[in-house]
Image (spheres, coloured by chain):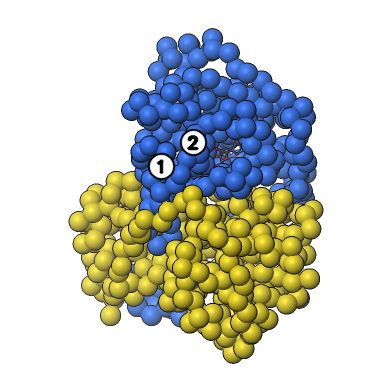
Amino acid sequence: MKILVAVKRVVDYNIKVRIKPDGSDVDIHGVKMGVNPFDENAIEEALRLKEQGKATEVVAVSLGTTANQDVLRHALAMGADRAILIESHVKLQPLGVAKLLKTVVEREQPDIILLGKQAIDDDSGQTGQMLAALLGYPQGTFVSALNVEGNEVTVTREVDGGTEDIAITLPAVITADLRLNAPRFVKLPNLMMARKKPIETLHAPEMGVDVKPRLKLLQVTEPAARKPGIKVDSVEELLSKLRTIEGIQL
Amino acid sequence: MKTLVLAEHDGKQLSPALFQAVTAAQFWNSPVDLLVVGSNTSEIAQQAAAISGVARVIQADAVHLAHPLAEDVANLIFEIGREYQVILAAHSSFSRNILPRAAALLDVAMISDALSIHNDNTYVRSGYAGNILNTIHSTDAIQVLTVHSSNFAAASLGGSAEVVSIKVPAAFGKTRWLAEKHNHSDRPALSSAKIVVSGGRSLGSAEKFEQILSPLAAKLGAALGATRAAVDAGYAPNEIQVGQTGVVVAPDLYIAIGVSGAVQHTYGMKDSKIVVAINQDPDAPIFQVADYCLVADLFEAVPTLTAAIH
Ligand SMILES: Cc1cc2nc3c(=O)[nH]c(=O)nc-3n(C[C@H](O)[C@H](O)[C@H](O)COP(=O)(O)OP(=O)(O)OC[C@H]3O[C@@H](n4cnc5c(N)ncnc54)[C@H](O)[C@@H]3O)c2cc1C
Ligand SMILES: Nc1ncnc2c1ncn2[C@@H]1O[C@H](COP(=O)(O)O)[C@@H](O)[C@H]1O
């Protein structure tokens, strides 16, 4: 069984991004980048399936520029067998990513395609579902537990009211939630070894799919700040302040 | 052209957020149809028909839709989607599962969690866990989106839309629904509660989380919320996680107790009308989004607060 994992390169989650002075986009020049946190869970789960003897090969794929090699190296250092970079100079959106991933799936024929449930830069949360649609595959999204048995994968999904369990016939698309697992730390020697592994590069314009952005970013602004708060010294003071607010009864 | 709203329900009742999604749908000034998917949905369809501003309720009823799966609902939307200029739903785990799939079938992009609608195809949505606002223009002929329901007023009752049934295609058949686990509580639903009492990892155990926060929530008629750290530690169930990867709430009053205030958390609560934070660290980032800041040990302050409330 083969597993394909999609790994996005995003701004580190600890960084507060700045907006370019002209408001055209965020300024990520020189900012610390890394693997999208959910995608680390996806890689981890694929590796665990391999360690359980259920999967035979784990292939990581990332779409972007040559800079994305670093997240693929991270995936290789975690234990992925191979890595594919799809280079695109057009800034890709979920539908475009899904179309390009579809061509990789058609070539690689994985049984499970693992993605993160959302990328923490755009918070779209769309690519996995779009890929499943384009492939005509079933989907298991927001997954916090997963078990492969024969040609079926049983998953627990985190939904608004609690959790839901579904059984899905393979091949299938799965999107990982953070509680799926705790991703392993990368050991330095593994990172050194990963530096030597080859990364296959494909070029988006040669892949025969339309990845023209459908959404145009017109402007980026900062949200209005909340007005500064008041420090209260005791529970009594807090309550007396709150009791002056209309509509709140305490 | 028309607008289609995907209705979320639990088999008995429509989701409160649907009423807000219907208001958002009025923006395009064209007839609004509601799609109700399920099994034995006549009651739900009648409820939907009574929402004012709804032109038609489209009822897709079949035994295999009792627990509607994304594959089946997306196929349904695909079948009727070309009749619409706009297809939207309230942002929720239900719609987030289905609409991207439907959008891809229709070969259009999707806009997730639109905060506001500027014109027929321009929206504002947040990025980077709410740190920035993006104004986005969609070039597609069909707009597929989810809306941030708390930013829209709820549509009222008083409508009398016609209900039409549509033929349901055969089940996709590659996914089987097995079970669901809902932690039933007598508290109000988190996403629509007027008051939310939220706790962090500092509560220290599931027992303490319950023992310290529940009496306060009970007195206030509040819903309970939690940070990811508290959920990961097993102090609270996943469905009450507030934040970027959990539920987004905007109650009248949000009380953050022993919560550090990471952006991933504040994303889910910073639109609350009044925020109270109780934290022993005067430099905790939560105080930057709080209206009332109490630097105190929660294990002392919260029981005192609970006792002082009538
Ligand atoms: C991709 C991603 C997504 C995430 N999504 C979410 C999300 O949706 N929701 C979310 O909440 N988090 C999310 N997080 C995690 C987030 O970054 C923080 O780690 C988390 O919110 C911290 O939880 P906490 O405040 O309970 O814990 P901590 O950060 O450990 O803070 C505990 C706080 O309690 C205070 N404290 C300790 N003891 C006491 C006491 N006795 N009395 C009073 N105060 C006390 C401390 O001063 C501290 O401020 C996400 C992280 C990532 C990487
Ligand atoms: N450029 C990309 N390269 C690799 N994977 C991606 C890319 N964009 C999105 N993905 C995958 O799709 C998931 C969801 O992304 P999104 O729909 O953008 O929120 C991510 O967690 C990744 O697994």
The crowd level at tag 1 (other Cα within 10 Å; few <14, some 14-19, many 20+) is many
Which chain is depicted yellow?
A: B
Depth check, front residue: A188 or B216: A188
Q: Which residue is drawn at 33% across and 72% down?
A: B187
Left or right of residue A231, residue B23 in this image: right
Depth check, front residue: B180 or B215: B180
Q: Quadrant of residue B179?
A: bottom left
Left or right of residue B164, residue B206 in this image: left
Q: Is residue B51 above or below residue A31?
A: below
Residue, disc 2 = A112
Q: Does the residue labelled 1 lie within 8 Å of ligand 2?
A: no
Depth check, front residue: A229 or B35: B35
Q: Where does ligand 2 appear, by image quarter?
A: top right
Q: Which residue is drawn at 46% across and 58% down?
A: B247
Left or right of residue A102, residue A229 in this image: left
Q: Report x, y in % for residue A249.
A: 38, 80
Residue, disc 1 = A153
Looking at the rendered image, the quarter that the C terminus of chain A falls into is bottom left
Residues marked 2 and 1 touching at CB (< 8 Å): yes
Q: Report x, y in % for residue A93.
A: 68, 42
Please tell me whether mark 2 sits on a helix, a strand or a loop. Answer: strand
Question: Which amino acid does the dot numbered 1 rest on?
Answer: Val
